[in-house]
Image (cartoon, grey):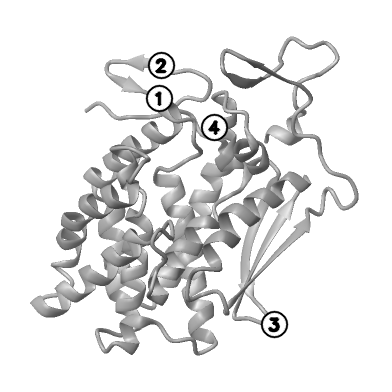
Amino acid sequence: MPKIKIQRGAEVYHNGEVEIEVQRDYQDLADQSDQIVRDIVKAYPKTKRLYESIMSDPRIMAQWDLANYIAVVKLGFNDHGPIHAQVVAAAAMQMMQLLLQRGVGVDVIQSGAGDLDDAHAVVLAGILLHDIGNQIHRVNHEAFSLTLAQPIVERHFAPIYTDPEQLQTMIGFTLSTIACHDCNPPPLTMEGAVVAVADATDMTKGRGRVAFDLGKIDIHSVSALAIEAVSIRSGSATPIEIIVSLSNSAGIFQVEEILARKLVVTPLKDYVTIRAVAASDFPEFDQRIIHSVVFDKGRFRVDNDSKDSPQTDDNVTG
């Protein structure tokens, strides 16, 4: 069967297929993220069953792939496909663990709708499906994601929640996280806040590399290349501390406009500290991301022909 893929730098059609290649280090991050999720959900049988069900669903994979094609190839955005879904799922599960370790309540439990396992299931389903609406269009993608996710959530929740009332309640909680993941409107539940903020933590250069190599040169793609790593750990002043390691000060744009912008309007705002630090390989000097760019045909592009402006070094491009 034809399957949508993406190849960096050009669109290549073979037997109806479009291939898009992603950066190796970003794929490695996805593999690591998958293991993090699996390790955490071992303690939650319903969530574990849900994760295995979603990840083995070819129809969901097809939706991730098409959403990624629209976002990356047609719009020049960074990754919005299955790798992004796995990376942010790991972030969301880690954040849930840190909140629970410090006794921070979540709405599924506080409302009486379910237990810890149910709360994790809501967050996991919401974070994995939040971006599938991009397959329709980026504009109003939250609403498209909501519409597309409803039958998926019901299909995968129904074997787990045999009580019709609880099934509907879990679906409602999950759809709320999807509708609010871009904070327009801001999430009202803690589960929704975790989904929104976890989504914003996927900002490393491996994700941004695809858009950059396809020719998108703007503050979004360039600043993304300045993010070496994002780590989530237990904080001292707050339950969660998010550490963003920068190789170039341009990365502050990502921290402020993507991560902090979401955090401040969610119920998580008092429970998370964001810390941007110089990456260990670049303790004193910023790494140069771009040597030369040219504006022509209505957009900026890397100036590959400039003798005075060599290509980005290998240790920058990853």
Query: In percent of the image, x 14 and y 68: which residue is there?
Result: 159
Query: In percent of the image, x 26 and y 55: which residue is there?
Result: 146
Residue 236: give its label. 3
176 relative position to 214: left or right: left
311 relative position to 296: left or right: right
Q: Earlier in the sequence, mark 2 or mark 3?
A: 2
Which residue corresponds to mark 4? 211
Which residue corresponds to mark 1? 19
Task: Determine which quarter of the picture holds residue 188.
Answer: bottom left
Query: In percent of the image, x 28 and y 38: which residue is there?
Result: 136
Q: Earlier in the sequence, mark 4 or mark 1?
A: 1
Q: Earlier in the sequence, mark 1 or mark 3?
A: 1
Which residue corresponds to mark 2? 12
Which three-letter amino acid code belongs to the residue tagged 4? Ala
Q: Quadrant of the N terminus?
A: top left
Which three-letter amino acid code belongs to the residue tagged 2? Val
Where residue 313 appears, x then y in whole percent? 77, 28
The alpha-carbon separation of the residues under discs 2 and 3 comes to 50 Å
Of all residues shown, which one is farthest toward the right?
284
Where residue 218 appears, x then y in whole percent? 62, 33
